[in-house]
Amino acid sequence: MSISRMRLRGALGQAGTIAVTLLGLLLLTFVIGRMMPADPVRAIVGEEASPEIYQQVFQQLGLDRPLWEQFLRYLGDVLTGDFGTSIRTGKPVIEDILHVMPATIELATFAILIGAGLGIPLGVTAAVNKDRWPDHLVRVFSLFGHSMPIFWTGMIALIVFYAHLGWVGGSGRMSQFYIGMVPDVTGFLLIDSLIAGEMDVFASAVNHLILPAALLGYSSSAYITRMTRSFMLDQLGQEYMVTARVKGLSRRQTIWRHAFGNIRVQLVTIIALAYGGLLEGAVLIETVFAWPGFGQYLTNNLIIGDMNAVMTCVLIVGVIFIALNLLSDLLYRLFDPRTK
Amino acid sequence: MENPILEVKNLCIRYNGAPTDAVRDVSFTLGRERLGIVGESGSGKSTVGRALLRLLPSAQVTAEKLRFEDLDLLNLSEAQMLKVRGRRMSMILQDPKFSLNPIQRVGHQVAETLLRHFPVSKSDARVKTLEMLAAVKIRDPERVHDLYPHEISGGMGQRVMIAMMLLADPDLVIADEPTSALDVTVRLQVLNILDGLVRDRGIGLIMISHDLNLVRNFCDRVLIMYAGRVVETLNARDMDHAQHPYTRGLLAAQPRIGGSRAPLAVLDRRPEWKEEART
């Protein structure tokens, strides 16, 4: 069998896995929708509607049909892009989500860049200096990031860096002053402001993004640091590291060329997972910073029982993880040449 | 001995935090010959090898003399050692399964030695690498060059290791149990390749092993180590005339095809041998 055909078969297999996963995910969200104590009919008709109207809507929603038929209908709706209407806003759910998702993606992406940019070098430093002072220092630093409640650090950071020092913007995605100044093209404020050529808005957006992103980044760097440290320790103890030294490579060269090269695949896995966690939305930080993101959206809808919105959010989180898995698979191939 | 490559006098090594020395008062000289170091696990033989390359970051190494050609190994800076390792002194490690980087092509790993020490282009390094792979009797160097360590056998892996360590044409090679991880059937083959290359190039070889038979067949002289010190130094051909009871114990513990079926002698280990003065 030729290599290209083997690759094609691999790709088809992967597509099949994704399809099955998605179907399972849809089944799960469907079951969640039916199991939740919230009554979708009551949510539409209100508390005071007569039993006749209630019955009418009950039938309109197809709730009198057998479950499998309801599931097929749900499947059809989702496939045609109809995720239902939000009870809270009266708008299609997908429209609301497309509005909050870019805010979260912006925050999560900057946070993971900071987290990985901080966590990887710190982890390597700690591993290379195991049990000496840099290691202890890094461990204390990441322990803080791991264990301090983020709503608390968020508030403290706002008081210090916004209220007292005035280095960064406060809550929201930009200053009140600029709201509505740039047209919504992609939903990503950083991109939209550049498209509109409004450098002031761009600066304000960066200014507002930097603090919550740094806090989330610090907190996720704690995990990345610890994992990098343990992956590196594992590699540094390997015999091939001695070989590299015997060949005449300096310690630094063996660390980066050999040991670090061999942990990239593992790093991709944990960073992708951390990124997925951030994309789910960081409710606490979003609340503290009044960030109109996905985490807040999901939480608010859960509280009031807006099931169409909740189901769609669950679906989106699932899709995010599937997408990140695909991305990590691609990166594995880049970082581990044996998989070619 | 005229112009010894290596002179070691009263070498002592203590691991940090250890109550006693792992190696005590080891002395020997090495010319362009093959010296075997034999001993049990923990006798300090591998520690000696790594100390010569100054690859014991967590140990104190002291000696009256530790001279390698024109260099005083004890007083070289790390920067100077980087020019010695791989270029003038190298080491063949035990198990190619672990001593080769699993995610790099073997040819790339072999060439790294050359690229580290000589200003050669990548294509020149490749040519030299292929030549060296052919020299260690790899039949299809072009193909093996692009393989990963998991795709080659143990015997071939060890030949790749030999190629890597001899590529920069060192004067001294330390072989630390080079065949212990190999199948019995390929041991001899690998040893013959190593032996041939070492002889042809006039390289000094230190063969560290626990295999007495192997060492007596492949080396000119043998050091017997016990509990961190050398108990006896012998010419390989005089092995049967060993004086020290420990050496004789080791020899007596070797089974022989066609020999007596009586149980083998149990190796005697006496604490006073740890302390006695070297003869």
Image (cartoon, coloured by chain):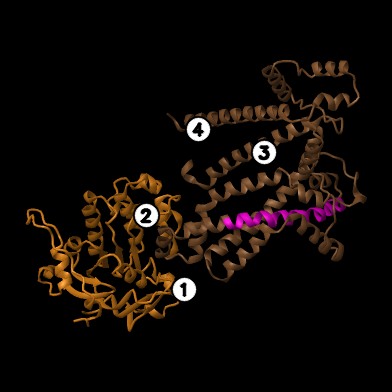
Identify the residue at horizontal 79%, vertical 19% (top origin).
A61
Q: Disc 4 vs disc 3: Cβ atoms closer than 8 Å? A: no
Identify the residue at horizontal 60%, vertical 38% (top origin).
A326
| Amino acid at the residue labelled 2 | Thr
Q: Chain of mark 3?
A: A
- In the rendered structure, the answer to whether residue A138 lies left or right of residue B139 reads right
| Amino acid at the residue labelled 3 | Ile
| A115 versus B271 height, above or below | above
Colour-to-chain, brown: A
Dot 4 corresponds to which residue?
A: A7
Q: Chain of mark 2?
A: B
Q: Which residues are magenta?
A: A199-226
Q: Earlier in the sequence, mark 4 or mark 3?
A: 4
Colour-to-chain, orange: B
Residue A148 on image: x %, y %: 71, 59
* Distance between the alpha carbons at the discs numbered 4 and 3: 24 Å
SS class, disc 4? helix
| B50 versus A152 height, above or below | below
SS class, disc 1? helix
Identify the residue at horizontal 55%, vertical 32% (top origin).
A14
User: Considering depth in this image, is A28 or B239 the residue closer to the camera?
Assistant: A28
Dot 1 corresponds to which residue?
A: B79
| Amino acid at the residue labelled 4 | Arg
User: Considering depth in this image, is B81 or A29 the residue closer to the camera?
Assistant: A29
Dot 2 corresponds to which residue?
A: B129
* Distance between the alpha carbons at the discs numbered 2 and 3: 46 Å
How would you rate the neighbour count of disc 4 (Cα within 10 Å): few for under 14, some for 14-19, many for 20 or more? few
Dot 3 corresponds to which residue?
A: A320
Please check whether the numbered discs 2 and 3 fall on a single chain. Answer: no
User: Considering depth in this image, is A229 or A309 the residue closer to the camera?
Assistant: A309
